[in-house]
Every structure is written in structure tokens, then in C-alpha cells.
Image: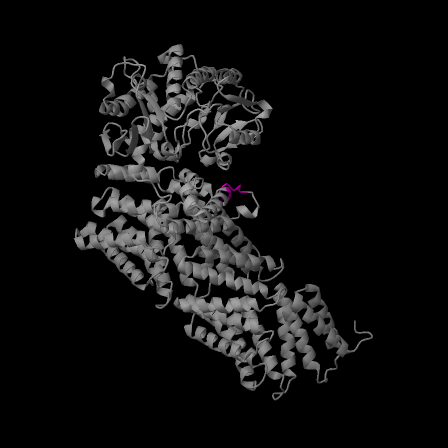
Amino acid sequence: MCGGIDYEYAYEQGEFYRSQFLRFGNLDAIEKAIEYGSSALDLTPNEHPHLPIQLCCLGTYYDDRFRRLGNLGDMEKSMEYYTHAMERTPNDHPNLPVLLSNLGIYHNVRFQRLGQLEDLSKSAEYYSLALTLTPDDHPDLPRRYADLGGLCGDRYHRLGNLDDGEKSIEYYSCALALTPEGHPNLPDRYADLGLSYNDRYRRLGEMADLEKSIEYYVHALSITPDGHPRLIDRHGALGLTHADRYRRLGGIDDLEKSIKYKSLALALTPEDHPDLSRGYAALGGSYTDRYRRLGELDDLEKSIEYYSRALEIMPEDHPGLPRRYANLGVSYHDRFRRLGEIIDLERSIEYYSRAISITPEGHPDLPLWNADLGVSYHDRYGCLRRIDDLEKAIEYKSQALALTPEDHPYLPDRHTELGDSYINRYQRLGELSDLQKATECNFRALSLTPDEHPDLPLRHFYWAISHYNQYQHTSDPSHLEISLSSFRKASQLSTGAPRDVFSYAHRWAKLATERTYLNPIEAFRATIDLLPHFIWLGATTTQRYFDLSLAENLAVRAASVAIQSSEYSLALEWLEYARCVVWNQALTLRSPVDSLSASNPALATQFQSVAQQLRHANSQSPDSQSAIYLPEHRHRLAREYGSLLAEIRELPGFVDFLRPKKLNELVRAARNGPIIVINCYESHCDALIIIPRQDHISHVALPNFTEQKTQHTRVELEMWLRRGGLRERGVRRPVTEPDADIGLVLVDMWNDLVRPVLDHLGYLDNDPADDLPHITWCPTGAASFLPLHAAGDYDQPRSCVFDYVISSYTPTLSALLTSAPTVQSPIPQVLAIGQEATPGYSPLPGTTRELTYVKTHTQGRAGYSQLTGSQATTTAVLDAMEQYDWVHLACHAHQDVIDPTSSGFFLHNGTLDLAAINQRSLRNKGLAFLSACQTATGDRGLPDEAIHLASDDDAPFVADKVYAQLMRDGKVGNGEAGKALHYAVARLREKVGEKEFG
């Protein structure tokens, strides 16, 4: 390139291409700048006065490429050229401050890359000398101050000296004050000052510093041109500060903004950029935060994915490597706590240990990593019960506390973590000194935590635990008083994340179940009141079912406590509200708002629109890429729904709008006869009975039917059903002798559970009659699996349920309240679905005969249509269900125990699941006849969320008798469907014999 050009032309071309690189970030431009800069240097004579300038330019170009690609060789060349330039520059030359400043920058950058304190010292030396040599009115003076501000900030990050953080703010403030409006470096000045205020916030925890940081970052972004390479830094910085504000204040909108800005920063970062690792790690941190807030497993997996990618592309000699290991330690630890896989806990310990082993002494992050490692050992102790793990936990947590400065905002965390391990060692070894140490740690943690801090409920919870243990040891009532006061605060403070506050209340309630002095009624009331915040509508349906499983039969346990306190009305309200939570939420989103529409039609329309959007968003497919299924969109809708609900409840007459029903409403569910709610928890089993037109609740204790017997009965029944092939339609009835064990199970259920209830109602004295009374069973918890209608001693006359009553079931009382009686319209519409030969499943030849019976009985009395074989696709059936009043399904079906809303019916082209059905507007419908078996067996993990749906030879017979009776009565809403089914089953029993009846 030297031939035919002079050094001035090469110099100008080099500067031009560098300006193009700085403006657009084009890598080719900086390559050409280096090429022309090298030519300019080669063409400049050794003694030429412009030689230092050519050396500086080429050094700058290499620095630019280093910052873009991260190749340390480029940085070394940059320093080499600038050192040569400085050596050729006289002490009184006006360019000397520039050379010194740039050398300071390069040493500082190399420090950031290699972590050597010597480079930091050299940088300080060069920066200080450059500032001293720069006149007060020089245009480069702001840059000198900015350089020193950056140096002090880096030294603060490395050594943790607060004085360096204060100096950083001072220098950056001077730089900003001296930078004129419109200057191209002004965005950097605002961003630099934002960084320093953020550093001081993280050190001292003052909210004013965090707000200033966000203010400066927002302004820096607003004046940074589109397409500028520093936009990566602008978005990334705002993402970090919003994450900090979320961790401090708990506002989920800050969490969403954090993910938004960090995602933008990562999207703008080229694949070969040296800051790419930092971008992945930053976004991984926000996904960790959102996982911990909402519990979505997908967020945790994203966290691990981004942290792993950040580690993979991080150079082995980079000083940020310990943080990458520690990040992965955090995510694997979280996954252990979610899934319980010990391998994840081992990985967590491994990554934390690596981080500590390669971190220099005195590094300000060492306390955090020691604390995290201590928590991992603590959890392994909880899992394996090895005392040496608990000792290691105390060792590392003590080290973390010792290394944490007295004024550090994380100091309360250190005390809480150490106190937790001391409590565990006290409970294991009984040493009173450990209890005293735990109490001291928790006192310090609570006293150091500011009001309105998200961790304040956690502090109160551990303070309550300390005094609860003190009370158990001393019986001093003052400890009990303090414990109860702090349990209340831990369960009521709105500053904490809802998942965490629910956890504290739930743990209080579990403790109080066996210790009445801890006020179990109050504890369970607090826990149940928090349910809608914990089982949040902004989460996916799958996630809400998982969260519900964590509640561990909350409703059943709470009702048992209320019953023992003779609070029968409260027990019934709790069972109604705290059971079937997810399904009730789905129904709430579909609730009519007629009264609101009459009072405030605009608000009603807005509310229904948001509810409908939220219902669709909650049905997301994990693979869906549509914007309406993005978590952020769903979360926004849930917040908007909550705000509208609060606004509606402020209106006159709407204070109870969509609130849980109270007893005076619930008792109205007993329209067609008594309702018997069965509740079994541990050694207590009880029946709560609602009698029509009575306002009080009757109670029948069932002391001989415990939760253990309930579980045993369920297991025996399930084994019997499986052995007989009765879980699936299409399996013939076995011809072997009946299993004697099942008879004993049904006898026990009759003697210990059903008979006492019927006796209380006075039904056992009734004479045999065709017009039997109708009762509705509402079993809860483990009892949800029991076939109460089949209970009886089949060897004795008039010793079975069906001899005395007609039985129906309901999952909730609200289900009965919302199913208003429907009289058959002049021409009701009946839809029948038949699948004689579903691809991949056993044939069901009986479905053809079954549908013939249905058609025969409806002819002349109802409109009839059927979809069979290949006609019965999921879409065709769904569309038809919207048009018809009754639906009859004769096909294979299944229940998904992992995701109950995936339960459904096997049609010609796939599964019609409940999630899809729930998306349609199926209002004011009548009968749904589900001629299938497996869907009635329940999900043992979520018994109260059981979603209720015969041998292929028996199904047509039953359908024939049911429709004959229904068409004669002409209605289905006053218990007629239950009566018709009772009649049909009675005829089947006569046909096959009681001993063969299964």
C-alpha cells in the first residue's frame, strides 16, 4: 500500500475508516484503519515531528480492535505504540497529557482483562499525571476527570474500598459538569455517573443512589444515536439497575424491564464481541430473579443456558471467570431446590468452590461466594443429614460474615444464613449455645433490614422461629408472644415476593397444626388469604398446578383444624376456596358480569376483554413463539386484570365482586338434597353436611376412617381395577371370581364412612321405595378417589348405598351453584361423538350400538347429530360443542397426572383436551355424558383437582337406560341426570348380578 501514496494520505484514510468504525461498528472499517495507519507509520521518517502522532493513531486503532474482538495481542501492540510515542514526546509538549491518558486507559483495560493490580497502579499513575498537565480551560479536561473516575470505580470493584467509590462519583461529576451540551461524549458522562451511583447503592443500599443511577442511565440512552456501538452498554446498564431496583422493592415491572433491556443489549452484541459473555450472564441473572419470583421452570432453564454460554466463551485467564462459575452455582442450586436432584446440588458446590479457589484474597465478591457455598452445604445436610455438611455450612457462612463490611447492604443476609445453620445444629445436637447464636444472628439481621425491604418478611420469619425454639426450651410466654407477632408480620408484609410470603405463612400453619399455642386458625387464615397471590393468574396453567402441589393439601389440613375447633362454617368456606384453585381461576375468567355491565358497561367490557386475553394467554404451548404467549405479555395482562378487579371492588355495591363465597351463599347449593363434604386428614375424618333450607352445618365425626385408611382403600381399588382391566373401555369384564379384598374394602367404606352419614340423615330407617332421596357427595383430598356410591356389604341385605339413596358427585359447591336448573327446550340439540376404531387404540364396537340407542331415544324429542370415525376430529367436535345443548362422548379417554388440563378424549386425529375445551365459550349447556373410564380415576398428586369424566359391552346398555329415563323426564338440572344414571346402573346390576358388578 505504500507505493504511490504519502504518509498524510494514509493518515487521513486511517482516521476516516476509524470514524466509520466508531459510528457503525463495522469490523472491516477498523481493519482498513490499521492497514492505512501501518502505512502512514512506515512512510513517516524516524525524526519527523509527526512520528508520535502516527504511533498514537496506530495504537488507537489496535485498541479499537481489541475492544471489539478481545484479542490481548492487540492491546499489547496498542501499549507498545503509545509507549514509543510518549518516549519521543518532550515533557512540555501539549500532546503529552493525551499520551499519558491513553496509556492509563490501556493499563486499566489490561487490568480488567487480566486482573493484575500492577496495571491498576500504573493506570492511576498515568491518569494523575495527565490531569496535572492538563490546563483548566483545556477541552480534554472532562476526559481526564472521567478517566480517573473510571479508575477509582475499577479499584473499588477490585478492593472494595468505599473511598474509591466516593472518588469515582466526584471525578465523574466533574467530568459531566465540564462537558458541553451536544458533545459526542456527553452520553458517556451520564452513563459513567450512573455506574458510580449504582456501585454506591450496591455498597450502602441507599435508594436515592439507585434512583439517580437509573435517571442518569435513562438520559444517557436518550441522547445516544441509533446504531451507536455504545447502545449495547446503555441497554445493559439499564437492565442491571432495574434488576437492582426489583431486588430492593420487589416490583415485577422492574423485573420485566430488566429482561427487556438486557435482551436488547444481547441482541445488539456481535457474536465475536468480548462483552458477549457479560451479556449472557446479565440476562441469566434476570431469568434467575424471575424464576425465584414466579417459579416458572422455563426461566430457570434459560438461566442455566445463558450462564453456561457465558462460561463457555469466557477466556480462562479472565478475572471475571470466578463470577461465571458462581453464577452457574446459583442456577444449579435453584434447580436442586425445585427438582430435588442431588447431582444439581453437587454441581452447585463444585462451581462455588471453583469460584472461590481462583478469586484473589481481598476480592469484594468473596463474602458472597462463601455464603452461597455455605448455603449449598446446608442444603446437602438437609438432604443427606451428614453433620460434616452442617459444620462446613457454618464454616463458610461464618467466613462470609467475617469478610462482609459492617455497613454493607448484604450484611443482614449473612446473619440470616448463619442463624439458619445454627438453628439446624441446635435441633440436631441440642446445644443451647447454638440457639443463642441463632437468636443473636436473627436479631442482627432484623435490626439491619430497612423498612419496606423485600427481605423483611424473611427476617421476621426467622426471628419467629428463634423465639419459637426459645419458648419450647424455656416455656417463657414472652418468647411465644414475640414468635406469634413475627409470624404475623412475615405473613402479612406486602414488601416480600408473594411466593416467599406464602411460604412463611404456610410453614407457620404447618407448625401450628400440632401446636395449638401457635394459633393454627390464624395461621391458616393468613395462608389461605395469600393463595391467589401465590397461585398467580400471570403464571401458566402448568406452573399453577405445580405451585398448588406445593401447598400440600392446604385446604384439607386447614379444614381439619377448623373442625377440631368446631368452626364448621369456616371449614366449609376454606374447603370451597382453597380446593380446585386452578380450575376455579379458569371459571372466574369466564364469569358473566351482568350486574357490572348494567352499572358500568365500559368497565365491564374492558374487564371481560382482559379476562378473555388472559384466558388465551394461559393456554400457551411451550413451543409457541407468538407474542400473545410470551411471559411478559401474560404477566402484563394479569397485573391489568388485578388492577381492574380492585377498581371494580371500589364501586358501590361491588365490594364482594368475584370474591370467595361465604356460607350464606354456599348453603344454597343444596337444592336437590343434602350435600355431604368428606374431609380426611391424618387421624381425623369428618363429614360436613348441608341440609336444604338450613343455614347451619351438621357435623358427623368418622373416627374409624382415617387418612391412612383412605389411602389404603384407594390403593386397593386401583390395584383391583388394573388387575381387572377396568381402567379402560374396550377391555372385557374378567370371568374370574371376584377379588375378596375389594369386598372388604367396600365393607369398610360402608361401615366406617357412608353408613354413619346415612344414619345421621335418618335414611337407614326408610322403607325400600322407588323414590329414593338424592344426595351429593363432595369428597376432598385423598377421599376424592373413593367410589362412595359403591360402598356396601354385598353379602348382607339392604347394606349398600344404592339401597337408600341416589348418589351424585360434585368437585365443589360452586359447581352446583353455577349449574342452574335447565328445562328441556322445545327442540334441545344433542351431539353424539363415537369412535369405534380410534387409530392406535383398541376397537370399541359397542359405540355404534350406543349411539343408535341415543338417537332412538332422542328421535322426535330433540335435535340429534353425530360425528363418528374420521368425522370426529378435534376441531369439528369443538365447533359442534358450541352449537349443541347436550354432548355424548363414546370413545377412549385419559387423565394426565402431570398436567390435568391435558386430560381429554382420543378422537380421530388427536386428543381433545380440557385446555382446548376451556378456550371455547360453552355457556348455558346441559348434559355431558362421558362414556369412558380412565378419566374418573383422579390425580393422586392433586386430588382436589380431579377432573371427572365400563366395559364396552356395558356402556351401550347404560346409555340406553339413561336416555330412556332422561327423555321421559325432559330435564337435567334438578338431579334428574343422577336419577337416570342410578336407574340405569340398577338395571345393569340386575343384569350381571351384584357379585359381578364392577
Residue at coordinates 52% horizontally, 79% vertically from top-left? 177
Q: Which residues are magenta?
A: 616-622
- For the image, the number of numbered tags is 0
Kindly report the secondary structure that dominates the magenta region of the rendered protein.
Answer: loop
**Image position of 739 (left or right of 853):** left
Quarter of the image with the C terminus is top left
Report x, y in % for residue 940: 39, 33
Query: Is 58 in front, or is 736?
Result: 736
Query: Is 206 in front, or is 257?
Result: 257
Report x, y in % for residue 763: 25, 20
User: Quick check: is 621 in the magenta stretch?
Assistant: yes
Query: Is 735 in front, or is 340?
Result: 735
Extreme-bottom residue of the structure: 92
Quarter of the image with the N terminus is bottom right
Please, is residue 405 above or below residue 757 in the view? Answer: below
Residue at coordinates 20% horizontally, 46% vertically from top-left? 517
Can residue 833 be seen from the camera position used here? yes
Report x, y in % for residue 976: 38, 22
**Image position of 652 (left or right of 186):** left
